[in-house]
Amino acid sequence: MLTTDPQYMRLSTIAVLFAILASGCTKQPSVEFGLLDDETVTATRDIQYEIGASYGYRVNFPTDIGKVILKQEFFLPGPARWTTNDPGDVGNIRELSEEISPDGSKLVSETEVDTSIETGAIQQYRIIEGDPAGPHTINLWLNGKPLKTIDFKINK
């Protein structure tokens, strides 16, 4: 039976809108990994060991979702000497914490990304003398939930 009761139609419209919003219309961010040249990512999981070579990832947020917490755990196959050129907070990214294991084989960091400023975040690394070759893993979390695991290899 069809009805033209305005109260029923208003509730039905609200229910349909809620169902659309709850049905997964909110997309997950995508993650690109590979060689980095400025903001361009050339996809690869095999990085050649070349001093100064730049690699990393870019997280692309589908829309402005406000401020989010991005956590990374970076595991190396051996000790490394970590250096930074990071001047601190840059653009849409604010560093919250960074911890390096005593032997340098693990880095854990958290940043706050403000997607209302820009809907992407780049993390860049450069190979320096003494960095270990072999398998590497980066685990990413978004607001405490697993986002992506990136397995790659640096080849000498």
Image (spheres, helix red, strand yellow):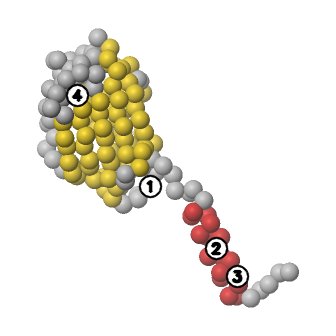
The residue carrying mark 4 is 105
What crowding class fits label 1: few (fewer than 14 Cα within 10 Å), some (14-19), or many (20 or more)? some
Label 2 or label 1, whichever lies nearer to me, is 2
Q: What amino acid does circle 4 point to?
A: Ser
Q: Secondary structure at mark 1?
A: loop
Q: In front here: 142 or 21? A: 142
- Looking at marks 2 and 3 on the same chain, the residue that comes earlier in the sequence is marked by 3
Q: In whole angstroms, how far apart are the C-alphas of marks 2 and 3?
A: 10 Å
Residue 15: numbered disc: 2
Q: In whole angstroms, how far apart are the C-alphas of marks 2 and 1?
A: 24 Å
| Quadrant including the N terminus | bottom right
Q: What amino acid does circle 2 point to?
A: Ala
Residue 63: numbered disc: 1
Label 3 or label 1, whichever lies nearer to me, is 3
Q: Residue at x 52, y 56 (%)?
A: 26
Q: Secondary structure at mark 4?
A: loop
Label 3 or label 4, whichever lies nearer to me, is 4
- Looking at marks 4 and 1 on the same chain, the residue that comes earlier in the sequence is marked by 1
Q: What amino acid does circle 3 point to?
A: Met
Q: Position of residue 133 (x, y in %)?
A: 28, 16
Which quadrant holds residue 109?
A: top left
- Looking at marks 3 and 4 on the same chain, the residue that comes earlier in the sequence is marked by 3
| Quadrant including the C terminus | top left
